[in-house]
Amino acid sequence: MVDRIDSKSTESAPLVVVGSVAFDNVITPHGSKEGILGGAASYCSFAASYFTQPRMVGVIGNDFGDEYLNRLKYRDIDLEGLQKDESGPTFFWKGKYHENFNRRDTLDIQLNVFEKFRPDLPKSYLDSQFVLLGNIHPALQMHVLDQLQGNPFVLADTIDLWIEIERKALLELIKRVSLFVINDSEAEELTEETNIILAGNKLRELGPETVIIKKGEHGAILFHEDGLFALPAYPVTELRDPTGAGDSFAGALIGRLASRNRTDFSAIKDAILYGTCAASLTVEAFGCDRLESAGASAISERVDELKKLISID
Amino acid sequence: MVDRIDSKSTESAPLVVVGSVAFDNVITPHGSKEGILGGAASYCSFAASYFTQPRMVGVIGNDFGDEYLNRLKYRDIDLEGLQKDESGPTFFWKGKYHENFNRRDTLDIQLNVFEKFRPDLPKSYLDSQFVLLGNIHPALQMHVLDQLQGNPFVLADTIDLWIEIERKALLELIKRVSLFVINDSEAEELTEETNIILAGNKLRELGPETVIIKKGEHGAILFHEDGLFALPAYPVTELRDPTGAGDSFAGALIGRLASRNRTDFSAIKDAILYGTCAASLTVEAFGCDRLESAGASAISERVDELKKLISID
């Protein structure tokens, strides 16, 4: 049995996670690594797996060996929705972080089997009550929503690329999103509002009941009809590779919500603490390594530390 | 009787505030204003006056009319230590903020009577138990400490200029400082450490028992032997003029501590809430205007809001 936080909970509601699966080559000021298991679906699923069993939807190519599949299986991730396309290799990304990690360049990108990816869900996934739409084309995110039964709680993430080239599709999508997660520069780009509080308010007017603006090392702000909530980041001192931090945040956040089958203001605040701490582990090593191996207790311990960090008593 | 927060407190210990008094011309993306009452000592004293009666030390020139003095007197600030030098005009600064307020240029600076300023304290100030050393030359800050009796609690602020041209004097000074307040870019410059957590730890090794690193709109982090405390900024939506935000923060912070005669971890956390809210008022108008006129209740209300903003319950 894989270790989970609150694993005795019987409230858990099914969660589906959709996104890219990738091999990454990452260059940082402190070193570089090749052939890293990456992609939004991988980070999201690993993070969510500390709370519930995520149903993973993505595509892998003919170079995705059992050693990688076993890492996902080891965390008890449901792989029925993970498509294997033998016609080519897995999505590939190569990026370089500059000094202080505050800027990154994409050096190479090869879509490979991801180019023809269509996120068709297995029948067994259609009753998912929680959905994480990782960063993929908004039309593909929409396709996932069109298949699902009932009225699931939908968390969607995006990146600047879709804001720039698919703004209309993105705006259509987020009307159907429950919790929209976006970083500060993307929020500014999408709303044309430089004040982060006003940007968050504007995003809520676009449809989502709840919005989270991520500020990296400066934490995150939650915009909800019941109020605002601001949380600093976990104080990381060993930053090694920021790739996947946002995906880990989203995965742990919705994993926590699904495991409690709660979506109220208080539950979302609690889940942001877990998302923040999962992300803090991810960035301490290349790829998913630290997140995968940390264990549920490492996340719980950081949540306790984070609560102390923000306590005024 | 001027309005103060917890004005019935009988615990208050005497506080002296030292810094520049200036006339500022400020240009922002939303407008500009000339002849603004400014300078660190002004902002610090106005902010502190919501908690206790600050003893103000600075110098004004022959252009500093009664209308300005009356504004300070109206907030019951003790002006015995405010020197008047008839030989020339008051310190003058002209600055311009760029779009998003994330960069400012000094367009003109005229030291005037500030050039020969020596912060000699009136005898009645020598028993001050709390000291705010606003941003002036470290040798002048040291001169203040040399005059004081006993073992006062010393808060010192600085700017990049002194780190660049008076590093040695600054390092000597901060050995004698109880609470060192510095912004993030200055902390990086002084410690040569880009990670803010490590920078804060390094600063404590230089002498001060307690360090606060200010991150502007991203809040502040407190480094104390009992632990860390991270606080987001108050969510300002009407940014008009950031000048004096740091001074207002420091003034309210030490004013609150002096009014309670407490310097423990919990008291400093509480005081940071008040500093943050005082600063949030300052930036909503040019100069000291909003801070001066807001009233004690406006600060208290914001502190309540800020507590809600960070509450996980």
Image (tube, coloured by chain):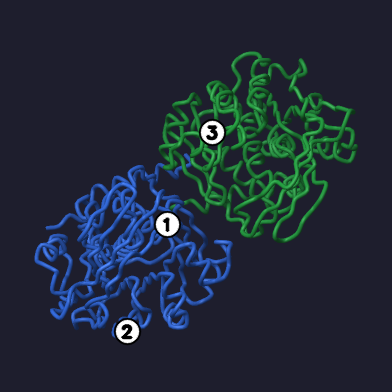
Chain colours: A blue, B green
For label 1, the crowd category at 10 Å Cα-Cα, with few meaning under 14, some 14 to 19 and many 20 or more, is: few
Q: Which residue is mark 1?
A: A103
Task: Give the Cα separation between the discs numbered 2 and 3.
Answer: 54 Å
The label nearer to you, 3 versus 1, is 1
Q: Position of residue A36 (x, y in %)?
A: 22, 60
Disc 3: which chain? B
Name of the residue lying farthest toward the front? A107
Q: Secondary structure at mark 2?
A: helix
Q: Which residue is mark 2?
A: A143
Q: Which mark is residue B218?
A: none
Quadrant showing the N terminus of chain B = top right
In which image quadrant can residue A267 be found? Answer: bottom left
Left or right: residue A138 compared with residue B175: left
Q: Position of residue B280 (x, y in %)?
A: 64, 50
Q: Which residue is mark 3?
A: B267
For label 2, the crowd category at 10 Å Cα-Cα, with few meaning under 14, some 14 to 19 and many 20 or more, is: some
Tag 2: residue type? His
* A54 or B86, nearer to the observer: B86
Cβ–Cβ under 8 Å for marks 3 and 1: no
Using the rendered image, report if marks 3 and 1 lie on a common chain: no
Left or right: residue B76 compared with residue A13: right
* A274 or B41, nearer to the observer: B41
* A3 or B170, nearer to the observer: B170
In which image quadrant can residue A257 be found? Answer: bottom left
Left or right: residue A52 compared with residue A234: left
Tag 3: residue type? Ala
The label nearer to you, 2 versus 3, is 2
Q: Earlier in the sequence, mark 1 or mark 2?
A: 1
Using the rendered image, report if marks 1 and 2 lie on a common chain: yes
Tag 1: residue type? Arg
For label 3, the crowd category at 10 Å Cα-Cα, with few meaning under 14, some 14 to 19 and many 20 or more, is: some
Task: Give the Cα separation between the discs numbered 3 and 1.
Answer: 38 Å
